[in-house]
Image (spheres, rainbow, N blue to C red):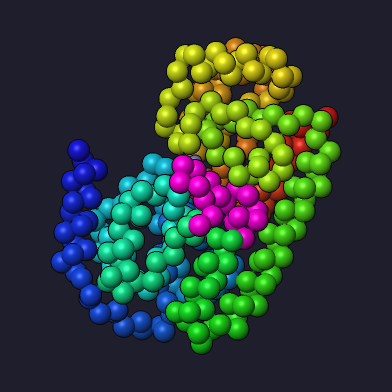
C-alpha cells in the first residue's frame, strides 16, 4: 500500500514536471544518477571526475529491497543521464524510464538485450558486465562528445580488465573437480553459464523469497549427496538460512558476494567490482578445485 502511494506521488510529480528545462550546470559537468554500485563503479572508471556521479542505492542496502523517495524523483527529473540495471532488479526504475526520457533525461537500461526477463544478475558475468559498461560508455560519448577521447581511452582500459577477469575465471574454474555450488539467492546463473557451473540456491531470484520447508530439505539432501563443503552466504542478506543449512549438514559457510551493493566496510576498505569478483573466484576455488 505504502509503495503504491509513493509510486503514485512520483508519477504525479513526473507528469507535473514534464519537459522541464535542464538546469544550468555551473561546473559544466554532466549530472549522472546511477542505481547500483557495480554500475557506479563502471561509470566512474570511464568518466572519472569529468562528471558528477551519484550512486542512488547507498552502501549497506541490498538492491532488490530499495525503494526511491519522492525527493530522489525530483532530482532524477533534472539530471542529464540516468543509468540503471534493468531486468527487473529495480522495478521502480523501469516504471519511470519512459517518463524521464520524455522529460529530456538520457536513460540507460544497461541489461536491456543482455538479461533474460526473469533474471537481472548480468553484472556477475564479467563479459556481460562488459556489455553493460559499453552501453554506459556509448551514452556518455553521445551526451558529452567534448570528453569523448577521455571516455574512449578509459573504456579501452576497462574493457581489458573485464577480459582479464574472464580469463582468470576460465583458467581457475577449468581445474574444478566439482561443478555444483549452493548459494543463498539465485544470483549466479549467468556466471555459472559462462564457466560451466551449476547453482543450487536456497532462495529464488530475490533474497526476500523465503524457501519452503520442502526446499530446505532438498538443499540439505543435495549437500549430503554431492560432497558440498561450503554453503555460500551474502554480506547484505541475513545469514539465517545459510546458518541453519550449515548447522543441519555440518558444513561451513563462506562468502560469495552477489555485488548488489558494497558493505560500508568494503567501501571504507577501497574495494571495487574487480577486487570483489577476484575474492569470489577465491571462494569458488576453495569449494570446487580440491
Ligand atoms: Zn539478486
> Residue 113 at x, y = what percent?
50, 57
- Residue at image x 58%, y 19%? 219
Span shown in magenta = 113-130
- For residue 12, above or below residue 44: above
- For residue 48, above or below residue 227: below
- Residue at image x 34%, y 71%? 105
Q: Relative to 251, is 76 on the left or the right?
A: left
Q: Relative to 70, is 111 on the left or the right?
A: right
* Most foreground residue, 167 or 244: 167
Where's the C terminus, which quadrant? top right
Q: Relative to 231, is 97 on the left or the right?
A: left
> Residue 138 at x, y = what percent?
53, 73
Where's the N terminus, which quadrant? top left
Quadrant hosting residue 250: top right
State the count of labels. Answer: 0
Is 126 a magenta residue? yes
Is 154 a magenta residue? no
- Residue at image x 59%, y 56%? 129
- Residue at image x 67%, y 72%? 156
> Residue 121 at x, y = what percent?
53, 46
Q: Is residue 102 visible?
A: yes
- For residue 197, above or below residue 202: below
Amino acid at each position: 500500500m505504502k509503495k503504491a502511494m509513493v509510486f503514485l506521488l512520483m508519477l504525479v510529480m513526473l507528469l507535473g514536471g514534464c519537459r522541464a528545462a535542464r538546469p544550468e550546470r555551473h561546473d559544466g559537468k554532466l549530472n549522472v544518477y546511477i542505481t547500483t554500485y557495480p554500475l557506479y563503479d563502471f561509470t566512474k572508471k570511464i568518466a572519472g571526475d569529468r562528471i558528477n556521479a551519484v550512486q542512488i542505492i547507498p552502501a549497506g542496502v541490498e538492491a532488490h529491497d530499495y525503494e526511491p523517495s519522492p525527493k530522489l524523483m525530483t532530482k532524477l527529473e533534472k539530471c542529464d543521464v540516468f543509468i540503471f540495471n534493468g531486468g527487473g532488479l529495480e522495478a521502480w526504475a523501469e516504471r519511470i524510464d519512459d517518463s524521464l526520457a520524455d522529460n529530456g533525461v538520457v536513460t540507460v537500461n544497461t541489461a536491456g538485450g543482455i538479461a533474460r526477463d526473469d533474471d537481472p544478475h548480468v553484472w556477475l558475468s564479467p563479459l556481460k558486465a562488459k556489455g553493460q559498461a559499453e552501453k554506459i560508455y556509448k551514452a556518455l560519448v553521445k551526451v558529452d562528445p567534448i570528453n569523448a577521447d577521455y571516455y574512449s581511452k578509459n573504456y579501452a582500459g576497462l574493457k581489458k580488465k573485464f577480459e582479464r577477469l574472464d580469463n582468470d575465471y576460465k583458467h581457475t574454474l577449468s581445474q574444478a573437480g566439482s561443478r555444483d555450488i549452493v548459494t543463498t539467492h539465485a544470483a549466479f546463473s549467468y556466471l555459472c553459464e559462462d564457466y560451466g557451473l551449476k547453482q543450487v540456491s536456497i532462495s529464488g531470484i530475490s533474497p526476500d523469497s523465503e524457501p519452503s520447508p520442502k526446499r530446505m530439505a532438498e538443499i540439505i539432501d543435495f549437500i549430503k549427496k554431492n560432497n558440498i563443503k561450503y554453503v555460500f552466504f551474502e554480506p547484505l542478506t541475513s545469514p539465517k538460512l545459510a546458518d541453519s543449512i550449515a548447522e543441519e549438514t555440518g558444513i561451513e559457510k563462506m562468502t560469495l558476494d552477489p555485488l548488489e551493493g558494497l558493505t560500508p566496510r568494503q567501501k571504507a576498505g577501497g574495494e571495487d567490482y574487480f577486487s570483489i569478483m577476484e575474492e569470489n573466484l577465491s571462494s569458488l576455488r576453495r569449494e570446487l578445485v580440491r
